[in-house]
Amino acid sequence: MSKINIAIDGPAGAGKSTIAKKIAKALEIIYVDTGAMYRAFGLYCIRNQIALDEKSLIDILDDIHIGIRFENGEQQVILNNEVVNAFIRDEAVGKMASKVSAFKQVRLKLVNLQQKLAEKKSVVMDGRDIGTYVLPHADLKIYLTASVDVRAKRRFDQLQRKGIHQEYEAIKEDITKRDYRDMNRAFAPLKKADGAVEIDTSVLTIDEVVDKILQLIKTL
Ligand code: C5P
């Protein structure tokens, strides 16, 4: 197969980015993290104190230029000529990304960029609507899940490792709210795509999941 597109969707903390990165490395193709694009958009809104209503967001669409480039295989997200990787992982930015991503016009702008990337290159792309909306003809669609407790625990451990203490219950509540927003928005909500293979990562190691997906790719 000359060009391959792999779509990986699922809720926050299901392991998408870790797994997608490993698959991309094994196949020597690029990994596109679409959540980072919504985060860059959210960062712009925080920095410029943009109100979260449709009119305010539509008004700024032309002022926001998001791009990505790859350096040593790592995705760099560019917001209006600035590499913003160092700023988009904050909890506040994640929360804002989750809110702005509910707006159709915001999504259409970023989906356009995502589709262009996949048109030109082989990609492993992860997000919430990749198999259902961005790349409905992807060669392989994966839907990664894990229980909310497992996902909250992973996030808790990840923050602890960074020396950040946040209550487990608060993390769980935040994840539950994000899931609700992602699954219930009117436009391109998070759901398992037709033909997607569902993998529950709660009881599997990362390498087990990666192996499973690589096996599926071999059958294409
Ligand atoms: O995956 P990540 O947590 O970085 O994504 C940040 C937020 O962006 C998510 O909570 C989700 O609401 C939104 N998102 C989306 N569609 C995508 C990727 C991310 O709505 N394809």
Image: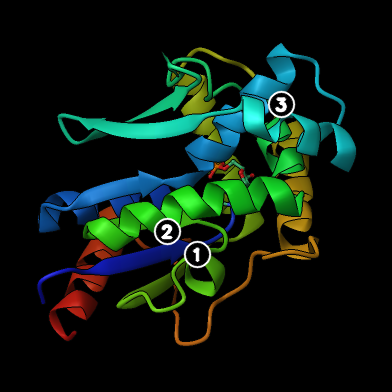
Q: Are marks 2 and 1 in contact (CB under 8 Å)?
A: yes
Q: CA distance from mark 2 to mark 1?
A: 6 Å
Quadrant in the picture for residue 18:
top left
Q: Is residue 69 above or below residue 101?
A: above
> For residue 115, which numbered disc appears in the image?
2
Tell me the element at label 2.
helix
- Circle 3 or circle 2, nearest the eye: 2
Residue at 39% x, 74% y is 141
Q: Residue 134 shows which numbered tag? A: 1
Q: Quadrant of residue 152?
A: top right
Q: Residue at x 48, y 61 (%)?
A: 202
Is the residue 58 above or below the residue 200 in the image?
above
The kind of residue tagged 1 is Val
| Whole-percent x, y for residue 77 in the image | 41, 28
Q: Amino acid at mark 2?
A: Gln
Q: Is mark 1 within 8 Å of ligand 1?
A: yes
Q: Position of residue 216 (x, y in %)?
A: 23, 79
Q: Looking at the image, do the residues carrying marks 3 and 2 touch, with CB atoms under 8 Å apart?
A: no
Secondary structure of the residue carrying numbered label 3: loop
Q: Residue at image x 15%, y 29%?
A: 72
Residue 177 placement (x, y as % from top left): 79, 47
Q: Which of pointers 1 and 3 indicates the residue nearer the eye?
A: 1
Task: Characterize the local packing of mark 2: few (<14), some (14-19) or many (20 or more) Cα atoms within 10 angstroms.
Answer: some
Query: Residue 214 versus residue 34: which sits nearer the camera?
Result: 34
Q: How many marks?
A: 3
* Residue under numbered circle 3: 167
- Local secondary structure at mark 1: helix
Q: Residue at coordinates 22% horizontally, 57% vertically from top-left? A: 121
Estimate the spatial distance between the alpha carbons at disc 1 and disc 3, rounded to whole Å. Answer: 35 Å
Q: Residue furthest front?
A: 62
Quarter of the image with the N terminus is: bottom left
